Image (cartoon, rainbow, N blue to C red):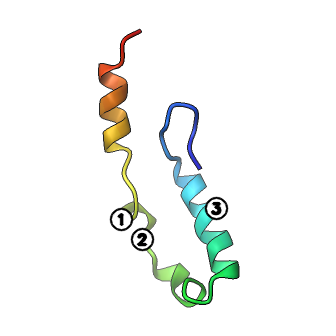
Amino acid sequence: MSNGDGLMKHEGAENVLRILGQYSRSAKPVRDSIDLDATYTNEFVEQALKTKSP
């Protein structure tokens, strides 16, 4: 779901939703209407990477 740098790729979120939709009764009927971009952000990690010492 995330890389070694802590950033979450959109493909990882899609994979989690796909698997969750297969096994969760509550997620399956709504998985196609879930806006993945509204469920996570990389903002914190991106800021941390900018201030990280080399």
Q: Are marks 2 and 1 in contact (CB under 8 Å)?
A: yes
Residue displayed at 40% across by 64% down: 39
13 displayed left or right of 41: right
44 displayed left or right of 6: left
Q: Give how far across and how far down residue 6 sits, in percent.
A: 49, 37
Check disc 1 and give the amino acid type: Ala
Secondary element at image label 3: helix
Secondary element at image label 1: helix
Asked if 44 appears above or below 4 in the picture, the reply is below
Q: CA distance from mark 2 to mark 3?
A: 14 Å
Q: Which residue is mark 1?
A: 38
Q: Give how far across and how far down residue 32 sits, in percent.
A: 53, 80
Q: Which residue is mark 3?
A: 15
Check disc 2 and give the amino acid type: Asp
Q: Which residue is mark 2?
A: 35
Pointer 1: residues within 10 angstroms few (<14), some, or many (20+)?
A: few
Q: Give how far across and how far down residue 13 sits, in percent.
A: 55, 59
Q: Give how far across and how far down residue 29 sits, in percent.
A: 56, 90
First along the sequence among labels 2 and 3? 3
Pointer 3: residues within 10 angstroms few (<14), some, or many (20+)?
A: few
Asked if 27 appears above or below 39 in the picture, the reply is below
